[in-house]
Image: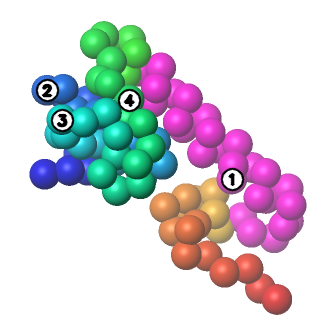
Amino acid sequence: MIGTSKYEGGKKYCRRCEIYFLHDGSFCPCCGMKLRLSPTGKKDRERLRQIRSLEQLTEIHERQNNKGAISKLATSPTTSSSFTPPS
Ligand SMILES: [Zn+2]
C-alpha cells in the first residue's frame, strides 16, 4: 500500500508525487524522480513536516496576494488544485 503519511520501514518519499513508496529502487516508479530515503530520527520528520507546511502556507499566501479575492483557498488548501479562477 502506498500513500501513507509517515516514514517507516524503509519507505521512500517522492517529492513530486507526494507519496511514499515501499520500493527497492532509488527512483520513483511513477515519475522517475529520485526518491528520498527515510530519515532516521523524529527530529528530521518534524523538520520535514514544518518545511512542507511552510511551503504550503507561502503558496497560498502568494496566490491571495496575486488574486485578491480568493480567500477560500486558505481554509481548503486540498481543493486548490481543482480550483478554476474566474475569467
Ligand atoms: Zn514520483
Picture quadrant of residue 7: top left
Q: Nearer the viewer, mark 2 or mark 4?
A: 4
**Residue 18 visible in the picture:** no
Left or right, 52 with reference to 64:
left
Can residue 85 be seen here? The reply is yes
The residue under label 1 is: 60
In the picture of the structure, the residue carrying the numbered disc 2 is: 9
The answer to whether residue 66 is magenta is yes
Circles 4 and 1 in contact, beta carbons < 8 Å: no
| Spot occupied by residue 78 in the image (x, y as percentages of width and height) | 49, 61
Quick check: marks 2 and 4 in contact, CB under 8 Å? no
The amino acid type found where label 4 is placed reads Arg
Would residue 67 appear left or right of 57 to someone viewing this image? right
Magenta stretch: helix, strand or loop mostly? helix
**Residue at point 77% right, 58% down?**
63
Q: Which mark is residue 24?
A: 3
Q: What residue range appears in magenta?
A: 46-71
Between the C-alphas of marks 4 and 1, the distance is 25 Å
Is 62 colored magenta in this rendering? yes
- Which structural element holds mark 4? loop
Q: Amino acid at mark 2?
A: Gly
How far apart are the alpha carbons under marks 3 and 4?
12 Å
Q: Where residue 29 sits in the image (x, y, percent)?
A: 30, 51
Question: What residue sits 54% from the left and 38% below the top?
Answer: 53
Q: CA distance from mark 2 to mark 1?
A: 33 Å
Figure check: 57 above or below 77: above
* Mark earlier in primary sequence (1, 3): 3
All told, the count of numbered labels is 4
Q: Is residue 6 above or below residue 44?
A: below
User: Which comes before the other along the chain, label 2 or label 1?
Assistant: 2
